[in-house]
Amino acid sequence: MIQEKAEIIIELLEGLYGQPVAKHMNPLDLLVCTILSQNTTDVNSIRAFNRLKEAYPYYEALLYAPNHEICEKIRVGGLGEIKTHRIKEALKKVKKDFGSIDLESLRSKDKDSAKEYLLSLPGVGPKTASVVMLFSLQLLAMPVDTHVYRVSRRLGIIPDKSSIKVAQEILERITPPSKYLSLHINLIRHGRKICRARNPLHNQCNLQDICDYYRGATSLK
Ligand code: SF4
């Protein structure tokens, strides 16, 4: 039942926003980029990432660069000191574990082993690990950010009181394997554009008929 509802939502969202295509990025670049994206906008995190790569085309150079210098390069994305520390600590561990600063060997791992390794890196939580798995390693993981969490609860494909961990488990169970990327990206688009945290634009939404939140709100009127 919920699986069917998820499939209808995927179809409706693709009708609105199209079928997303992921830009290829190697797993380590994506990991660094995702750390930089914490608590900032996409535009600023991409700017910070580009400035970082321009200054340090090789991660070895970044690893041995002074923190204040790195911090300056990524300042545009905010939390410069914290992110510098997280990135350096993650790179150090990757180097220690694999002998070089490279995550390509994760491609040969299964989902659980790749996830376990990524989560062992300092500063890497379930969302960052899932982003790297889905977008770079092509492993079936569903990153749950604030938009995915809010919109999928409002629509009623996950129970309202679910934790983020449970939400991820349910979404991974009910989403067809070929649609993980589509559902993830389109829920974010919908959450930013229409189903905003405050004042969701119900009247502009074509998911009204299957939305639990909307049904609940209108039945009270
Ligand atoms: S009907 Fe309203 S609450 Fe439901 S998905 Fe659309 S905007 Fe969000």
Image (spheres, grey):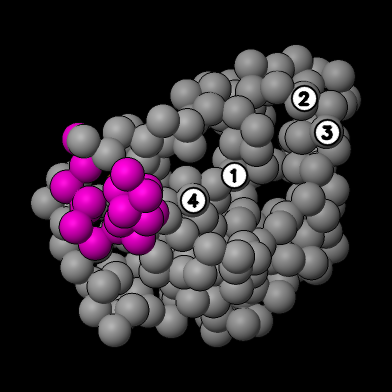
The reply to whether discs 3 and 4 touch (Cβ–Cβ < 8 Å) is no
Determine whether the residue tagged by mark 3 lies in a helix, strand or loop: helix
The reply to whether discs 3 and 2 touch (Cβ–Cβ < 8 Å) is yes
Label 3 sits on residue: 82
Q: CA distance from mark 1 to mark 3?
A: 14 Å
The reply to whether discs 1 and 4 touch (Cβ–Cβ < 8 Å) is no
Q: Amino acid at mark 2?
A: Gly
**Of the residues under marks 2 and 1, which one precedes in the sequence?**
1
Numbered mark located on residue 80 in the image:
2
Decide if residue 187 is on the left or right side of residue 37.
left
**Of the residues under marks 2 and 4, which one precedes in the sequence?**
2
Camera-side residue: 3 or 183? 3
Camera-side residue: 81 or 207? 207
Q: Amino acid at mark 1?
A: Thr
Residue at x 29%, y 70% (from the top left corner): 6
Q: CA distance from mark 3 to mark 2?
A: 6 Å
The reply to whether discs 2 and 4 touch (Cβ–Cβ < 8 Å) is no
Camera-side residue: 13 or 115? 13
**Of the residues under marks 3 and 4, which one precedes in the sequence?**
3
Q: CA distance from mark 1 to mark 4?
A: 20 Å
Q: What are the residue bounds of the magenta stretch?
A: 204-221
Decide if residue 72 is on the left or right side of residue 178.
right
Label 4 sits on residue: 150
Circle 2: is it few (<14), some (14-19), or many (20+) Cα within 10 Å?
many
Residue at x 77%, y 35% (from the top left corner): 83
Q: Is residue 10 magenta?
A: no
Q: Is residue 110 above or below residue 98?
A: below
Q: Is residue 102 above or below residue 77?
A: below
Q: Is mark 1 within 8 Å of ligand 1?
A: no
Note whether residue 9 is visible: yes
Label 1 sits on residue: 34
